[in-house]
Amino acid sequence: MGTLVVVTQQDGPTAPPAPGEHRTDTVEQGRFCYARCACGWRGPARRARSLARTDAQGHATDGGNP
């Protein structure tokens, strides 16, 4: 099985997500990267990190809709 790497951009200490808040990060697994959210949402596997980040941004901006 491949290596799992979680990549989170942090600007400093943050509080746990508030109910209904969509805090996203990206996860690298082998040659693929996907976005995930504290609400349990997971985006599709992508070869480009930029697309995974776009998925995460879209999820957070759309109020949690896939």
Image (cartoon, rainbow, N blue to C red):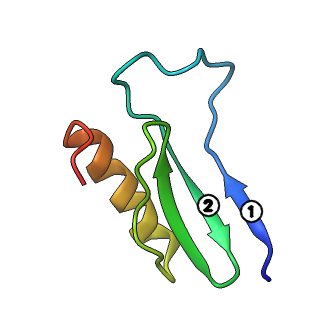
Q: Amino acid at mark 1?
A: Val
Rendered position, 52 above or below 60: below
Tell me the number on the disc at residue 22. Answer: none
Return the residue at label 1.
5
Residue located 27% across and 41% down the image: 64
Of 15 and 44, nearer the camera is 44
**Alpha carbon separation for disc pair 2 and 1:** 6 Å
Q: Quadrant of residue 44?
A: bottom left
Q: Is residue 28 left or right of residue 3?
A: left
Residue located 51% across and 66% down the image: 34
Q: Amino acid at mark 2?
A: Val
N-term-proximal mark, 2 vs 1: 1
Q: Is residue 40 left or right of residue 59?
A: right
Q: Quadrant of residue 61?
A: top left
Q: Position of residue 65 (x, y in %)?
A: 21, 47
Tell me the number on the disc at residue 27. Answer: 2
Q: Position of residue 32 (x, y in %)?
A: 58, 79
Residue located 51% across and 83% down the image: 47
Rendered position, 53 above or below 25: below
Q: Are marks 2 and 1 in contact (CB under 8 Å)?
A: yes
Disc 2 secondary structure class: strand
Disc 1 secondary structure class: strand
